[in-house]
Structure formats: C-alpha cells, structure tokens
Image (spheres, rainbow, N blue to C red):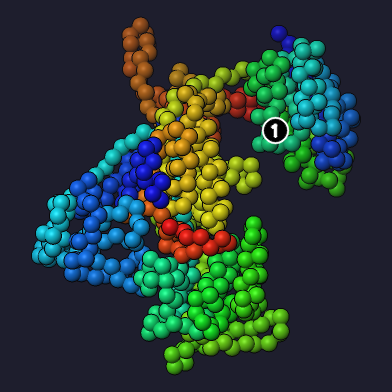
C-alpha cells in the first residue's frame, strides 16, 4: 500500500469516484469527483488527536459493524493515507452546528468544515477496472441459517476482522454475543456459491482455502477448541494449497461432507443440524460460533461504472473479458483492461498475476506514440446523406456527430448538415449502415454492395 | 483488369479433412470465375502453409486471396499478415469458415457438408472480387493510465505500470487504499500478513 502511495509515477486519489468517461483508446477524457474529506490533508500530520477527542461513535463499516469508530476517523492503524476524514452524515457539527471539537483541538488547523467536492478532469490513454468484489448478501437468502438474526452466525470477513491483530479485538477470536472465546466453531462453505436455488451458480474459488485457514487459526489460537467444516467439495488447485488443507485436517479440523439444513439457538449455544453424506446419516453439532463462507459478487456500484466506460458484463454482473483464454485481461472496448475479482471470483495470488498481466497490456499500449486504427469502420457518403441523423441515435460508441458542409446548388453556396464519423470512436459495428435510409452510411470492408453480392451468390 | 484470386483450402487435420472431400472441393472451386490458382494443405495456418500462400501469390501474380478454413476470429489476423508479407494490401482478403460453420456441425452428413463448403467458398469469392485496399489511420496516445479501484488488483496494476515509467492515476472511492485485502488477517497458503 505504501509502495503505491509513495511511487513518484502514481497520483493517488482516495475518497474519489470516476463520474464521467469520454473518448476512445489512447485518448480518454475522465472526470473524477473528489469527495470532501473536511480535513486538509496537506496540513494534517496524522497525529490522531481529533479521532481521540471526537465524542460521537458509530458502527465501523470497516469492522463490518462489530465495533465502533469515531466520526472523524482512520479505518485501521496502517491505513494509507494515514490521515482522517469526517463522516458528515453522523458528525455532530454537521447535524446540529455545535461541537467542532476536532477543529478546536487540531494543532495544524487542518479541519475545514467548509470543504466542497471537487471535479478534476484528466486525459488518459488506458483505463484499468479493478473494482473488486463484495460478499453475497446471505441474510436475504438463507432462512435456515437465521437470516442474520443470530449474533454468533458471522461471515468469513467478520472472522478476518477479529483475527487481524490490528482489528477491533486485537486478534482475539470472540463470540459477538458475549465476547467469550468460542470453544466449538462450525464453518459452512458454499453459502451462496454453487447454489442455483438461493445464490449463484459459480464457485467463488477462494473460500475452500480461507476456510482451511480459519479452521487452522481456531485450532492454533484457542486451546482445546474444535473446528468443524461442512463442505460440498474441497477445491484446492493451487501451489501449496492442498498441502495447507491437509495440514489443517491433520491439526484436527473435522471436515464433514454435507450441507447444513438448520441452525437454531439453544441457551447460549447454536445447534447446527446437517448431514454427513459419507456416513449417510444426520449430524448435530453444538457450536459457539458459526462462520459462513459467503460467495463473492461484483462490488456494489460496479454496474454503474460499467455503463460509464462501456464495459460489457456477464450474466452475474462481473466485467466480461474479450476472450476467456486468449484475451483474459482485455475487454471488447479498446484501451479498457481488467484486473482482479471485478472479472470473476479469485484469490490473492491469481489477482496479483492477472494485475501484472493487465499492466503489461497497458504498458504495451502506452509505449506507442501513435496507434493504427482498424480501417474497417463506417464512412458517410456526404452526397447521399440527407442529414436525418438516425445513425447518430443508434451508434453505441457515440462516434457520429453532425457536420455542416457547403454545397453549390445552382451556382449558389448552400449550407446543410450531414453525419460525420469519428474514426477513433467508431468500432465498425455497422448499426448505422442498417439504420441509414439513404444508403449513405457504409462500412468499409462490409459495404452494402459487397454484402449484397455475397447474398446474391448464395441465392443463385 | 481481371481479378486474380488465390484460393487456399485447409484440412485442419481431420477437423475439416475428416468430414468433407477437400480435393474434390478444390477441383470444383478452382474453375469459378476469377480464381487464378487453388490448392489445399493440411494446416494452412502453419509456417509451411503460410509459405505456400506467399509463394503462390508471387508465382501466379495473385492480387487477392481467399482462405477456406476456420473462423476469422481465430486466424484472420494471421493470414492478413501473411499476404502483407507477399506484398498485398492485407485487406485484399476474405475467409470462408468451413470448420465451425460447416464440418463441426455437419459431421454426420459428409456429402451435404461438402456442398455447403463449396457454397461458403463461393460466397467468399463473391466478396473478395469486390474488396478494395484499405489503409489504417493513426491516432495519438496519451501516455497516462487510469486505474479504478485501490485494492490489491488496482495497486499491483498501478505499481507495475508506474515501474515501467508511465504516469498512473489510482482512484479509490474509500478514504484509504488496500480494499478487502487490507481487512484480512494472514493470507493462505503462506500465512503472511496482508497489510
């Protein structure tokens, strides 16, 4: 993280969103909205006094609501940039006009309640989508696991926040209900993955391994603990992956092949009922904590950003690559590349490899001073064009604009409007040639005359 | 001036050659109008296959080429480069897809498939008779990249591009970078720290 922030060639824009993208490969123009932080990061030294003194606590999004944060906050101790922002929605000053403790106490005068959002326009030659994933909303789908009513049924990411040494519990695994250390932990895999009825058809790929890691951590960190893993299959296709899984099993994790049909509370325990399909009989496990390995889904808002950059998506909403084997980091839009879980579920090693692959494609593009464009694009015969501009409406690439030309009719110059094709934007799809009633739009390499000749030949 | 078309029919091993009668297809199609030279080869996309095309263009003074083989999605760029090597404009070219659109889907009807292959070649000949040289135009390149998302993927992309000497703008919607990865504890299989 620090390497990315300190690199002289990287301009880091946090708390920012891309709001507009125009242009084409080699020549994009993007607008980025810098959200107001209400803290001048040029003045702020990151001393943390404001965070300490802020009187308002709200549930921390970063700790998935398990713990609290202040209203002027830094998500975690090693955060980059290590300077706070103010949550204006919950801040006492923004709500009531009173308080302002942070502003009074800041030794450098960095707090600025008047800060406004800013829009920055930049020209770039290539765009990489790396918008990542979110977790499947299991609370809406899995009634048998309590629809989120049971405090001690959590997701793998909650577990990570607890076992993370810089997290809320300082690395201690606890039960959210009473803060006690759990002695019996049940893990359930494929919650939302490989479940067409309730979730997604696909495998989320990382869960088998992180569940093995979680089971290992329970056994390693909690003395006398038991870890049970309910699974459909154990998928460990990666370097040193299967060895890792086997180590967890040898450490004592009990893997039970079968699905969990019901979880209910009994006293302060959770009763997990399932089936062991290898033994062919039902099993019941008394658990202190249940951890669900929930499916990866495209990150919230990725559909909007896909529209902004004209990036096609697949049936599950992940960004679509140009070819699954031969062009895995490219998209059908020239100059637009993909990295990481925004293309489909994957783990960290695969993400890093793919990201480097995408980087090479970008570098190969940016190393050119100029680019050759595909000549098989649309052209307008201005003499035939009536200027109706139906073509403009059907062009998915915004490649057609109006142009005023001067003609001599009866010896007098007459101005009229015709359609004009931007050769950089046109992708040669041919929509305009079909829409053009005058027959003025023609796709080079697929002209009306050529296509008709082909049809003629076949009909003879 | 009369057009001089070169027609090259590919066996694709048994993919095409195992279904249709390739020599018979060549025998019939070589007499079609405009065809100055026709031949077949086991793998047209292979180096010797491409050399066959280059040699024929020179020896028979061909001015345009049809290759009847697989989908243009696969090898159209390959053959465009081949004919450009022989001095032709790369767009004086047309492909007839006699694999995906013919032998792969009609393997149970060999005679029918042979007739369809001939029809598809006829179509390509009609098209190639009417093609004209096309020329690429050039657009400038802004030497800067935008990376949307500051998680592990975005950071890695940004660092690699930046290390290669190009400017990068890394945009992250949250107040800090690191994404989901920074939320994690140890990572498998090596159990090293994620942050």
Q: Eyeballing the image, is A89 above or below B74?
A: below
Residue A123: x and y in percent read 36, 33
Q: Nearer the viewer, residue A60 or B9?
A: A60
- In this rendering, would A121 be left or right of B66? left
Residue at point 65%, 75% (across, down): A250
Residue A110: x and y in percent read 17, 51
- In this rendering, would A254 be left or right of A224? right
- In this rendering, would A337 be left or right of B70? left
Residue A378: x and y in percent read 51, 27
> In the rendered structure, the residue with mark 1 lies on which chain?
B
Residue that carries the numbered disc 1 in the rendered image? B75
Residue A53: x and y in percent read 18, 66
Residue at point 78%, 22% (across, down): B51
Say which quarter of the image contains residue A163. Answer: bottom left
Q: Nearer the viewer, residue A352 or A135?
A: A352
Residue at point 61%, 76% (across, down): A251
Q: Eyeballing the image, is A414 above or below A117?
A: above
């Amino acid at each position: 993280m620090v390497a990315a922030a300190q690199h002289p060639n990287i301009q880091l824009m946090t708390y920012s969103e891309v709001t507009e993208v125009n242009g084409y490969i080699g020549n994009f123009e993007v607008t980025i909205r810098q959200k107001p932080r209400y803290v001048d990061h040029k003045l702020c030294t990151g001393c943390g006094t404001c965070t300490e003194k802020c009187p308002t606590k709200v549930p921390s999004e970063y700790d998935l609501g398990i713990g609290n944060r202040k209203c002027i906050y830094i998500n975690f101790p090693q955060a980059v940039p290590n300077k706070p922002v103010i949550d204006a929605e919950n801040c006492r000053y923004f709500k009531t006009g009173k308080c302002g403790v942070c502003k009074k106490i800041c030794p450098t005068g960095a707090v600025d309640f008047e800060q406004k959002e800013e829009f920055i326009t930049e020209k770039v030659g290539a765009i990489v989508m790396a918008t990542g994933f979110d977790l499947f909303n299991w609370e809406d789908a899995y009634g048998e696991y309590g629809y989120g009513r049971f405090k001690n049924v959590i997701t793998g990411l909650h577990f990570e926040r607890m076992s993370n040494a810089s997290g809320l519990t300082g690395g201690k695994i606890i039960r959210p209900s009473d803060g006690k250390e759990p002695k019996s932990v049940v893990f359930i895999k494929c919650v939302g993955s490989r479940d067409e009825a309730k979730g997604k058809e696909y495998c989320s790929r990382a869960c088998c391994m992180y569940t093995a890691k979680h089971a290992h951590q329970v056994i390693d960190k909690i003395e006398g603990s038991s870890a049970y893993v309910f699974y459909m299959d154990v998928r460990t296709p990666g370097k040193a992956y299967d060895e890792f899984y086997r180590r967890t099993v040898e450490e004592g994790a009990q893997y039970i092949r079968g699905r969990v049909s019901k979880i209910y509370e009994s006293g302060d325990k959770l009763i997990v009922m399932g089936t062991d399909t290898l033994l062919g009989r039902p099993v019941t496990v008394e658990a202190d904590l249940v951890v669900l390995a929930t499916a990866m889904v495209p990150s919230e808002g990725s559909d909007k950003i896909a529209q902004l950059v004209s990036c096609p998506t697949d049936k599950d909403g992940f960004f679509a690559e140009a070819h699954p084997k031969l062009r895995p980091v490219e998209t059908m839009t020239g100059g637009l590349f993909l990295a990481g879980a925004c293309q489909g579920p994957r783990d960290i090693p695969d993400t890093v490899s793919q990201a480097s692959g995408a980087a090479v494609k970008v570098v190969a593009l940016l190393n050119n001073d100029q680019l050759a464009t595909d000549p098989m694009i649309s052209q307008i015969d201005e003499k035939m064009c009536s200027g109706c501009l139906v073509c403009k409406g059907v062009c998915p690439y915004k490649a057609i604009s109006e142009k005023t030309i001067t003609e001599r009719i009866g010896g007098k110059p007459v101005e009229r409007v015709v359609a004009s094709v931007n050769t950089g934007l046109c992708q040669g799809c041919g929509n305009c040639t079909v829409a053009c009633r005058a027959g003025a739009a023609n796709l080079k390499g697929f002209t009306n005359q050529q296509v008709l000749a082909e049809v003629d030949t076949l009909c003879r | 001036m009369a057009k001089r078309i070169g027609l090259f029919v590919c066996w694709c091993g048994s993919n095409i050659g195992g279904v249709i009668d390739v020599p018979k297809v060549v025998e019939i199609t070589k007499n079609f109008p405009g065809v100055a030279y026709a031949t077949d080869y086991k793998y047209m996309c292979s180096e010797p296959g491409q050399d066959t095309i280059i040699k024929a263009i020179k020896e028979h003074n061909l001015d345009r080429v049809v290759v009847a083989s697989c989908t243009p999605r696969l090898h159209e760029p390959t053959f465009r480069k081949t004919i450009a090597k022989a001095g032709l404009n790369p767009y004086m070219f047309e492909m007839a897809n006699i694999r995906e659109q013919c032998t792969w889907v009609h393997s149970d009807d060999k005679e029918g498939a042979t007739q369809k292959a001939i029809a598809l070649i006829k179509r390509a000949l009609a098209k190639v008779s009417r093609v004209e040289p096309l020329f690429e135009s050039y657009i400038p390149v802004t030497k800067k990249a935008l990376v949307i998302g500051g998680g592990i993927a975005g950071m890695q992309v940004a660092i690699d591009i930046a290390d290669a000497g190009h400017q990068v703008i890394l945009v992250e919607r949250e107040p800090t970078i690191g994404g989901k990865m920074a939320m994690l504890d140890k990572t498998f299989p090596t159990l090293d720290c994620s942050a």
